[in-house]
Amino acid sequence: MAGIDDVARLAGVSTATVSRALSGRGPVSKATRARVDAAARRLGYVVQASASSLASGRTRCIGILVPLLDRWFYSTVLSGVTAVLMEHGYDVTLYNLTTDQAERERIFDTFLRRQRVDGVVVIAITPTDREWEQLREIGHPVVVIGEGGDGIRSVMVDDEAVGHTATTRLLELGHTAIAHIGMVTDDPHTSPAARHRGYERALREAGVAVAPALFAPGDFTVGGGRDAAARVLPSASAVFAASDELAVGALFAARDLGLRVPEDVSIVGVDGHELAEFFGLDSIDQFPLQQGRRAAETVLAALGEDVPAPPPGPVPFRYVSRGSVRPPAT
Amino acid sequence: MAGIDDVARLAGVSTATVSRALSGRGPVSKATRARVDAAARRLGYVVQASASSLASGRTRCIGILVPLLDRWFYSTVLSGVTAVLMEHGYDVTLYNLTTDQAERERIFDTFLRRQRVDGVVVIAITPTDREWEQLREIGHPVVVIGEGGDGIRSVMVDDEAVGHTATTRLLELGHTAIAHIGMVTDDPHTSPAARHRGYERALREAGVAVAPALFAPGDFTVGGGRDAAARVLPSASAVFAASDELAVGALFAARDLGLRVPEDVSIVGVDGHELAEFFGLDSIDQFPLQQGRRAAETVLAALGEDVPAPPPGPVPFRYVSRGSVRPPAT
DNA sequence: TTGAAAGCGCTAACAA
DNA sequence: TTGTTAGCGCTTTCAA
């Protein structure tokens, strides 16, 4: 495996010049650069990551923290992040935070502190105060998809607006017995919490009382949605589900109860999941691929890479009609 | 950020001893190790990855090549791989091979050759001859989930047996007009190709002619399955789909055609996807999480890590009945 | 624009 | 069992 000396020898220059030519940092004459490039190509030379990192302090690697890999939203965001980073020559190191507390600590205490990454993208995780602190301490840019903390860049949709939009749509159709299925968290800074707030605000603004019995928690899976919906469907004419997976679960629950959608019950989800289309499910698309791309561009920009500056403010979402809502039967 | 010298000073030993104590390589007395551990903990010292790698030649990082992230099978395998690697203190660097040819080349030419990884896990990708060559050249263990190449370790289910099992089940129920929806590849060493062979062999063994009109290609998505199934359903009493996503698509196609499952048509899929349960879909579960775990253990074993030796031979699969098949209507 | 040379922070011979 | 020391393969001052 060729080293930088081999390239230097073949090109008839010093290793310093090879380094400058190949990295693009520092002045190199056009002719020299061409000779170095040719020599490098001829030898199949690729700079060794660890040596380069040790000498320069840059790793060209971004760490990604993600809570689950097998959920559509996360894996789609991840696709967006990796695509952009790869285009810019960055590697991606994946840290899958499970529910195992010891493992989680090890990621924050050790993995992230090995100086293996130049930056971190956090997907939909709510770090504790201490974890925020640790993220800041690594001394590299951190971008959160979701609500950020102090001095931490964030890419997010306005989840309260999402909840408000979906609920308002149902209200406008004339529904008043609108159930919500989502997740209960003690942390108000999460997407489910914000969507829930948006739901309640829309109801209040419309003068409709918020009925606690019309909320049912369920984890963000089809099964969770089915179980949660089964509890509220008997007393609701419409359901706002905090994710498309939950909404699909609600469709199954409706079927089990002999309810037709949308004749007997209207259902709206959130995400833009592939399945929403097949089920003819109204949904608020939040463009997860774009969120991932934007997060990646945000870290790269913070690292001084030449990327289109991501626009400030929350990322867009869009209500997509597919036929799962209609005015309530009278 | 504390360095190894700080730890050495605080513990009253040399840096070499700190290195030995913390890495576990080389002899250190019990008392010394305790002092070093205490000093390291006190200073919050974590070894710097690039310096350690440069000096030792080991990176404690495994590269993973995956074609798609947002498909259930791949992301589940990936979960299994990352879980095991993390348990052993290994990082995971993710390379998402898209269909972009230039990007793919860059991964094989550059990314994998930066000596950033100690080993590679390839998920469901069919490398070209040249790419196999490049994988071997990096001089590290490579494990493929799917059919391997020369001198490359492989973790795989016997996909021909999978196809044979599913088809045989339908034959035993009395079906003869059994359609297959899968993927067309010119490469015989892929899962879809093997499942297709198993399907045809089962038919031949049962004395049923293989009807080319009963095969329809579709990419491995719900949409692909729906379109493919729409073409073969009119002339089939049963469908063997090469994945659960395809099978779910077939369910939608059946519904669109006014066919009931299983009264009018029987459907079997492959994977063990969460949705199979909700749709009451018969499926061959291939335990992707276990496949991922086994692949990770295989690389680790090859690197001399202390892991349970993965059993040889193909990984298990299991036919799971959920009510989507029955004898053909007469 | 180039080259010489001093590290980057750690590991692993080797000697004690 | 421990310390001394010479690198690992690059990058980056600094001087020319």
Image: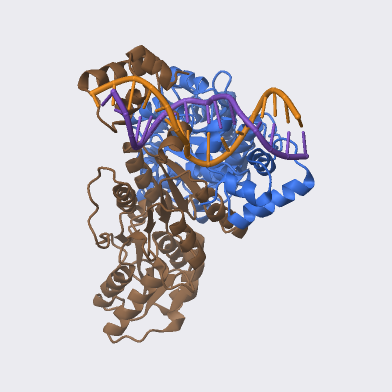
Chain colours: A blue, B brown, C purple, D orange
Nearer the observer, A327 or B222? B222
At 45% from the left and 24% from the top, the residue drawn is A127
On the question of residue B44 being in view, the answer is: yes
Does A21 sit left or right of B155 as displayed?
right
Quarter of the image holding residue A159? top right
Query: Percent from the top left, x then y, of residue B292?
Result: 34, 50
On the question of residue A174 being in view, the answer is: no
At 35% from the left and 42% from the top, the residue drawn is B85
Nearer the observer, B278 or A113? A113
Query: Percent from the top left, x then y, of residue B52?
Result: 43, 33
- Please say if B67 is above or below B167: above
At 46% from the left and 57% from the top, the residue drawn is B137
Nearer the observer, A275 or A151? A151
Query: Percent from the top left, x then y, of residue A182?
Result: 44, 34
Count of all numbered marks drawn on residues in the image: 0
Nearer the observer, A147 or B80? B80
Quadrant showing the C terminus of chain B: bottom left
At 46% from the left and 60% from the top, the residue drawn is B125
Query: Percent from the top left, x then y, of residue B259?
Result: 41, 69
